[in-house]
Image: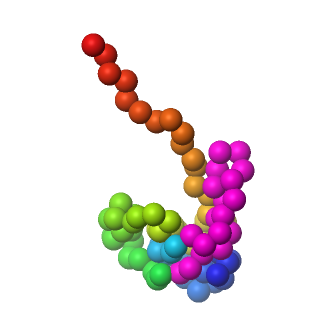
């Protein structure tokens, strides 16, 4: 399913979905095809996102495009 189809079905709502196809551009993952799981209440969106695993996300349908910023080599330094 394309993102614009989801926006027309669930405008101004959070939705949970699984990523089917994406591509990388300028350290961002642009998601262009998803498998919709369903709408998520505003109060539950953060909890659902934190419990999401693998290629499952929660995103708000008001956004024009699904963009995930990729971070590389994140870690903590240990000082002795």
Query: In the rendered view, would you say 71 is above or below 19?
Result: above
Identify the image's colour scheme: rainbow, by chain, secondary structure or one colour: rainbow
Total marks in image = 0
Q: Quadrant of the C terminus?
A: top left
Q: Position of residue 7 (x, y in %)?
A: 62, 78
Q: Which residues are magenta?
A: 19-36
Q: Residue furthest left?
A: 80
Point out the residue furthest to the bottom here.
9
Q: In this rendering, does residue 4 appear at all?
A: yes
Query: Is 69 on the left or on the right of 42, as rendered?
Result: right
Picture layout, residue 80 above or below residue 66: above
Q: Main secondary structure of the magenta part?
A: strand
Against 23, residue 75 (above or below) is above
**In front: 19, or 63?**
19
In this rendered view, identify the residue nearer to me: 20 or 11.
20
Return the x and y of residue 67 as percentages of the image width and height.
62, 58
The image quadrant that residue 63 belongs to is bottom right
Q: Residue at x 58, y 55 (%)?
A: 68
Please indicate, yes or no, whether residue 46 appears anywhere in the rendered image.
no
Residue at x 47% of width, y 68% of height: 56
Place of residue 28 in the rendered image (x, y in percent of width and height, measured from the top left): 64, 50
Q: Work out whether residue 57 or residue 78 is closer to the camera in this orientation and state it.
A: 78
Q: Residue at x 46, y 82 (%)?
A: 38
Q: Is 71 contained in the magenta span?
A: no
Q: Position of residue 21 (x, y in %)?
A: 65, 69
- The residue shown at (46%, 36%) is 74
User: Residue 66's image quarter?
Assistant: bottom right
Magenta-span inclusion, residue 32 = yes
Of the 4 image quadrants, the one containing the N terminus is bottom right
As drawn, the residue found furthest toward the top would be: 80
């Amino acid at each position: 399913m394309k993102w614009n189809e989801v926006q027309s079905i669930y405008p101004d709502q959070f939705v949970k979905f699984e990523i089917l196809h994406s591509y990388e551009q300028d350290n961002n993952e642009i998601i262009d095809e998803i498998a919709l799981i369903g709408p998520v209440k505003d109060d539950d969106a953060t909890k659902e996102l934190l419990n999401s695993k693998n290629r499952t996300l929660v995103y708000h349908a008001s956004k024009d495009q699904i963009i995930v910023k990729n971070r590389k080599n994140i870690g903590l330094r240990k000082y002795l």
